[in-house]
Amino acid sequence: MKAFDYIRPQSLEEAEGHLTQEKRVNILGGGVTLFLELQNNDLTPDIILDVKALPGFHDIRYHHNHGLKLGAAVNLQHLATGLEIRRHYPLLNQTAQELASPQIRNRATIGGTLAWASPVSELAAPMLCYDATCHTWSPRRTRTIPVNELYLGDFKTALEPDEIITHIHLPSFPARTYGIYQRQTVRHDGRRMIAGAATLAIRKHHTLTNWRIAVLGVDDRPKRIPEAEALLEGAPDEESIHLALQAVQENIHPQDVVYARSDYRRAVLDALLQRSIHSIISNLQES
Ligand SMILES: Cc1cc2nc3c(=O)[nH]c(=O)nc-3n(C[C@H](O)[C@H](O)[C@H](O)COP(=O)(O)OP(=O)(O)OC[C@H]3O[C@@H](n4cnc5c(N)ncnc54)[C@H](O)[C@@H]3O)c2cc1C
């Protein structure tokens, strides 16, 4: 492994001094994938810039009108165990509990997990359903990127090389928001994803509105399927569920992998979504 400088800035101004054109800089979150890439010599940086001591990067703040602010260095175990997350964003909480192992969750940060941009990144699914936005800083500007626009394809994001995710924002959702995350993997720790999906809808009287379907493992990026979501609005019957599932199939492009052929991944996703949609509709039976 090539030698590099390890820098842990205490402020963005201090970080700015290291983000120069002359040096190759890699941003460090929890290091779960970054360290593997360094070990394999896939990356040969001059500087590793650890963002975990930056102010506000560990914040978790919820306000019933404004929603949830999560600092980029908050680790995934907080999402799996935090009471506020469980109460107000149960889909995020459920997904985090299923993601990897407690050891990985204790290290992995939200910023690093989103920036990693794997087509099978599970955290992306609830973030897409909750309309989350990434807030970023670079020496040139700050900006807000909807998670829906963050992913450009296989491990590619809209982030520039010196752009740091500072925090993630989730808008607030009504109490009767129902979500479910389902996935099928080869290994129990979440690796070797066959297919996964997060589904969400908001109950309004006897209908379900604002349906969201986010899929992973079946395209070059985690993504929403708005064509299917629109078909479920209201109180969907079997015919509209069938049409929505058909719309999902028309808008995904799964790859053959050694452990699952693309047609199998399609069939698995279909089964997961059928189960999720019916489970959400069953909430209409509650008074
Ligand atoms: C054994 C194992 C099991 C796993 N199981 C699962 C699983 O079940 N489900 C799943 O979805 N994933 C799984 N993963 C992937 C894991 O979730 C990610 O590797 C991890 O979440 C990355 O987060 P990190 O904070 O460690 O990022 P790092 O490894 O530190 O960084 C990853 C990338 O993000 C960049 N980055 C980091 N922080 C920021 C920031 N604030 N702003 C901009 N860029 C940043 C880095 O430069 C790097 O390119 C697994 C990984 C391993 C090794």
Image (tube, rainbow, N blue to C red):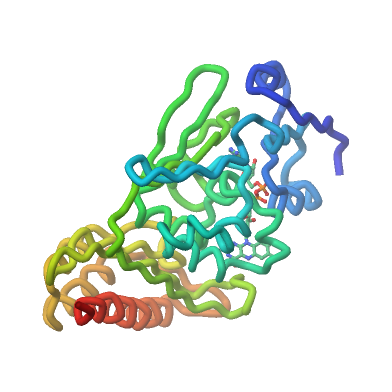
Which image quadrant: the C terminus? Answer: bottom left
Residue 101 coordinates in the image, percent (x, y): 67, 69
Q: Residue at x 63, y 22 (%)?
A: 12
Residue 237 coordinates in the image, percent (x, y): 12, 80
Relative to the observer, which residue lies in front, 108 or 175? 175
Query: Quadrant of the rendered structure where residue 4 is?
Result: top right
Residue 187 coordinates in the image, percent (x, y): 62, 78
Left or right of 104, for residue 227: left
Relative to the observer, which residue lies in front, 160 or 254? 160
Residue 144 coordinates in the image, percent (x, y): 41, 32
Relative to the observer, which residue lies in front, 220 or 12? 12
Does residue 114 appear in this view? yes
* Residue 197 sits above or below residue 134 on the image: below
Q: Residue at x 44, y 71 (%)?
A: 196
Left or right of 285, for residue 181: right
Left or right of 65, for residue 31: right
* Residue 31 sits above or below residue 99 on the image: above
Query: Quadrant of the rendered structure where residue 210 is?
Result: bottom left
Which image quadrant: the N terminus? Answer: top right
Q: Residue at x 58, y 62 (%)?
A: 81
Query: Quadrant of the rendered structure where residue 133 is?
Result: top left
Q: Residue at x 88, y 35 (%)?
A: 3
* Residue 13 sits above or below residue 124 on the image: above
Does residue 148 appear in this view? no
Left or right of 272, for residue 246: left
Relative to the observer, which residue lies in front, 219 or 209? 209
